[in-house]
Image: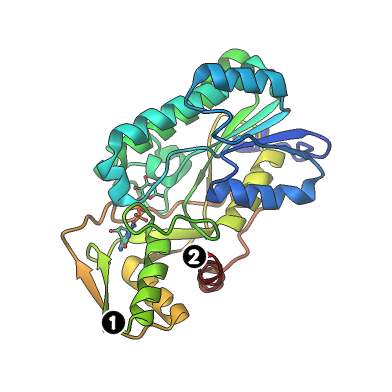
Amino acid sequence: MPIEAVTSMNGFELAGRRVWVAGHRGMVGAALRRRLHGENCELLTVDRSEVDLRRQDQTERWVNATKPDVVIVAAAKVGGILANEAYPAEFLYQNLMIEANVIEASRQAGVSKLLFLGSSCIYPKLAPQPIDEASLLTGPLEPTNEPYAIAKIAGIKLAQSYRKQYGCDYISAMPTNLYGPEDNFDLQSSHVMPALLRKAHEAKERGHKQMTIWGTGTPRREFLHVDDCADGLVHVLKHYSGPEHVNIGSGEDVTIRELTEAVCEVVGFEGDIVNDTSKPDGTPRKLMSGSRLRAMGWAPKIGLKDGIAQTYRWFLAHRA
Ligand code: GFB
């Protein structure tokens, strides 16, 4: 079905609805809470200590008792390239359980709209760039994050299948590499942006002459500030209904070396950048095509340099 045929121009109204953000304490969940503030909806959240989304009985009991109108599945086990390599079983198992439990519980409770969040790593390692949504399942995945990608592809297929078999208005969005406030700054498990901010900051603070980055620095990545992502997700929720997933990106990518130089400039670290090539590069490039979302009238607002500076200010204020 052509995308125009399933895109509602009038929009799906969030005002007055009960919206559950699953994963509200994560970086994306926190940004969604900030963004949904202006929508006049009732925000529902539940802590992990009360409901473990990996447990079907706990999830179904809570969703059936709470009866949200709208669900955003931002809950996930996430991490950077080394965490994905080191804990493949956790990334596959936990993400499969969370998405299956939340989606099935939502169907049982009669949720009218659900948005599932994936990741740009769902696409083949060598997909033509910029990566169109139609590239899904056209080639082998990047080995460092294959288990996570397979879990996220399963989530897309769940949303599509629930739409096809049960008529549920369940949709999926694929954000690119995200960064911003509330990110994970742990050097072993984090993504590249928070790692570089912390490394550059600590190198400057300690008067080091160099900082080390993983891999060759040549891979290209597309970065999107998490507040732009939350805005794009709300836009998709309000204006899209269809079986195909929607990419959410900035439309621009940089090499890891260029990103490191931008981070060092913001932080004020002037030493050398050294490559640790014993660490993996991962996929050479994953720039997504944003044409589907642009056609729905959405564009990002936060440039990379401003976004890095804002995230560095957040890091300085919260690093304790
Ligand atoms: O952000 P990142 O961990 O994940 O790494 P991916 C991106 C690139 O930055 C890789 C390099 O080429 C890394 O080798 N890099 C350089 C670093 N220095 C560092 C550092 O200090 N820390 C980290 N983490 N990277 C993840 C996937 O892939 O992206 C997930 O594993 C998910 O499944 C996520 O899709 C968005 O972009 O390579």
**Secondary structure type for disc 2:** loop
Question: Which residue, given by chain and number where applicable, does mark 1 sit on?
Answer: 208
Residue depicted at x 33% and y 56%: 285
Q: Position of residue 149 (x, y in %)?
A: 37, 37
Q: Quadrant of residue 206?
A: bottom left
Q: Judge the density around disc 2: few (<14), some (14-19), many (≥20) Cα neighbours within 10 Å.
A: few
Q: Provide residue 175's location: percent of width, then percent of height.
A: 50, 48
Residue name at image x 38 percent, y 80 percent: 205
Q: Depth check: give the residue in front, 317 or 112.
A: 317
x and y percentages locating residue 292 in the rendered image: 57, 46
Which residue type carries mark 2? Ala
Q: Quadrant of the N terminus?
A: top right
Nearest-to-viewer mark from 2 and 1: 2
Towards the viewer: 303 or 83: 83
Badge 1 density bin: few <14, some 14–19, many ≥20, Cα 10 Å = some
Label 1 sits on a secondary structure element that is: loop
Whether residue 222 sits left or right of residue 255 in the image: it is: right
Label 2 vs label 1: CA separation?
21 Å
At horizontal 71% and vertical 27% (from top left) the residue drawn is: 68
Q: Quadrant of ligand 1?
A: bottom left
Residue 61 pos. (x, y %)? 62, 17
Query: Label for residue 304?
Result: none
Which residue lies under the disc numbered 2? 320
